[in-house]
Amino acid sequence: DTAVSQTPKYLVTQMGNDKSIKCEQNLGHDTMYWYKQDSKKFLKIMFSYNNKELIINETVPNRFSPKSPDKAHLNLHINSLELGDSAVYFCASSQSLLVGGAEAFFGQGTRLTVV
Amino acid sequence: ILNVEQSPQSLHVQEGDSTNFTCSFPSSNFYALHWYRWETAKSPEALFVMTLNGDEKKKGRISATLNTKEGYSYLYIKGSQPEDSATYLCALASGNTPLVFGKGTRLSVIA
């Protein structure tokens, strides 16, 4: 049973398209996140949701819109994809907003390639 | 913007060697320091979460220490094995921000 699952694992699409990446966690966690692994292999926070409410929205283009239908799901929708959006996107969850001892559990990543 | 630094960037050791790497972070508004192990083609997995100055945690041959006053943590691996080859990430939890990750130390253990 995968604790945090993302789909799809790989996504190849053309510039200008709109695409979504889905994330689900079965850990009963309150908080979910999207991280982007950039070209330097660096994990950078994009969004954080706590109990379906947006908590953190880092400097991310508004073409990226997270949606949390319930606290077990946090999907990432991307409009008008650009070449620079190519990266690996990781979903994660934790029991709380990572204050103190709440470790994060990561999905396996979605490798997005925009051509 | 919080800055979490890890060194070295990469490390090659022989099987059986012990090794350690460093994570440096700003000590203000400290809440927790996390260490994650990230194998190629997998997702990061938590090794330790440390919250108190002077914390020492151990899991098998891997251990970590924390100094929140001076803003650093060490990760130690005793008797490295090829299966220890991975990228080791540290991450800082501070205030109400989610984890800020360092760039990792890539460890290769040569048999």
Image (cartoon, rainbow, N blue to C red):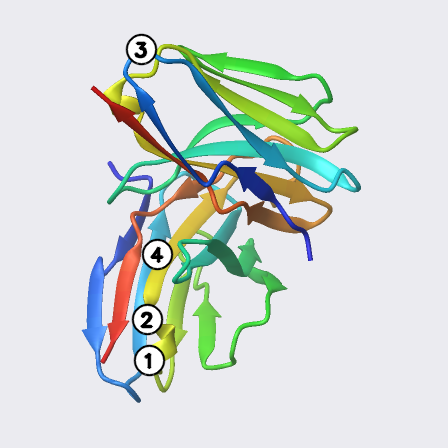
Is A11 left, or right, of A75 in this rendering? left
Residue A43, above or below A21: above
Of tags 1 and 3, the one toward the viewer is 3
Q: Same chain for labels 4 and 3? Say yes or no.
A: no
Q: Same chain for labels 1 and 3? Say yes or no.
A: no
Residue A74: give its label. Answer: none
Q: Which residue is mark 1?
A: A83
Quarter of the picture holding the N terminus of chain B: bottom right
Residue at 32% from the left image edge and 62% from the top image edge: A22
Q: Which residue is mark 2?
A: A86
Query: How far apart, in angstroms, are the residues tagged by discs 3 and 2?
Result: 39 Å
Asked whether the beta carbons under mark 1 and mark 2 sit within 8 Å of each other, the answer is: yes
Please report, as a chain letter, where disc 3 is located. Answer: B
Disc with the residue nearer the chain's start (4 vs 2): 4
Q: Which residue is mark 4?
A: A23
Asked whether the beta carbons under mark 3 and mark 2 sit within 8 Å of each other, the answer is: no
Can you give x and y, in whole percent of width and height, for residue B111 in the image?
20, 19
Please report, as a chain letter, where disc 2 is located. Answer: A
Residue at 31% from the left image edge and 72% from the top image edge: A20
